[in-house]
Image: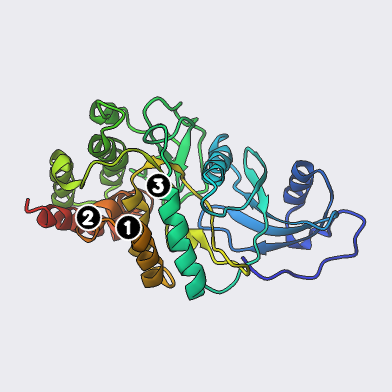
Amino acid sequence: MNPPAAGPPPGGPARRAGAPQGVTDRAAALAGTHVRAARPVGGGDISAAHRLELADGRRVFAKTRPGAPAAFFAAEAHGLRLLADTGTIPVPAVLGAEPGMILLEWIEPGPATPAQAERLGRDLAALHDTPAAAYGTPWPAYIGSLPLPSPGAPDPPGTPDTAVAPTGPGTPDPAAEPPPEHAEHAPASPDDWPAFYAGLRLLPFLRLATDNGALTPADTRAVERLCAVIDQVAGPPQPPAVIHGDLWSGNVLWSAGERAHLVDPAAQGGHPEVDLAFLELFGCPQLGRLLGAYEEVRPLPGRRGRVPLYQLHHLLVHAALFGAGYGAQCGAAARAALEGAGR
């Protein structure tokens, strides 16, 4: 997010130079007051984002995505509230959500300091010690722009979504239902983490990425071999814990206050090592301090050897969305996970 900008005098709607009128009008309706000023800010790869100043003095963050499935921002709101309800980690307050828009509390950004990183590590450890009712979510959920299947959750609506690249023959419809074939891999027990991870986090996205031409046949076979022996590589038993679910460095909001906030979650019941592995995938400021503080509170013996396994879900999502640039990384991660387990 960018620093605040000066706005027009108070007392009426914003001059619309900084945001489309539809954005400010809808945000005003959700917030219950006029928008005095608006400016675009960074908000991610698939949504537009604006910093708004309201007539009552509040500063808010508005994220919009025309053509998004009806449940898309409701899922984000559910996830933020799930994280907030744990009382362990700061997230922006949800001020309102409707199809195509979510309105959040504005968090003033700041530098990634060692103190914030260490506090975030301890906060994440506390989050991951919070039990979840089950793996996955009871609501339609998304990872990026792709539906995220869960046992018993309603299927996300199949609204066409034209805002996501790539396009063309063989490209998966990002808003379509997950492939029905994933049902054969669904866990036999709600406490069966390895089967859940293979059946609902790896194989559906492997199919999307393979159909998109992102993986070679050899890389596809490597992921399939890994899924076939998932019980032997997934690590110690792990009951469902609350996780962020999409914890790359861009979803850590370093603040001007004392604590970093988490944003844009795919929050769910899952495995804590998924969050930690994704933090490492694209790099994160102060990562050594963050992980060191985490492991002081919540040691995870053997975790280093499982990092490729728990990065694979997000690599497959990226391959499904963005193509072959990530396909080879999927195969390499699967082979590393197999080799680390002596397979």
Check disc 3: other Cα within 10 Å, few if <14, some if 14-19, many if 20+: some
- Sequence-first tag of 1 and 3: 3
Q: Are marks 1 and 3 in contact (CB under 8 Å)?
A: no
Point out which mark residue 306 bears. 2
Left or right: where does residue 82 sit relative to residue 271? Answer: right
Residue 72: quadrant of the picture? top right
Q: Nearer the viewer, mark 1 or mark 3?
A: 3
Which residue is at a point 67% across and 58% down the rendered structure image?
106
**How far is the residue under mark 1 from the one under mark 3?**
17 Å
Point out which mark residue 165 bears. none
Q: Are marks 2 and 1 in contact (CB under 8 Å)?
A: yes
Q: How many numbered marks have been drawn onto this rendered protein structure?
A: 3
- Sequence-first tag of 2 and 1: 1
Which residue is at a point 37% across and 53% down the rendered structure image?
275
- In percent of width and height, residue 244 lies at 45, 49
User: Can you say which quadrant of the picture contains the N terminus?
Assistant: bottom right
Q: Is residue 51 above or below residue 136?
A: below
Q: Which residue is mark 3?
A: 129
Point out which mark residue 277 bears. 1
Residue 284 appears in the picture as rendered? yes
Q: Secondary structure at mark 1?
A: helix
Left or right: where does residue 38 sit relative to residue 278? Answer: right
Amino acid type, label 3:
Asp
- In percent of width and height, residue 123 lies at 47, 57
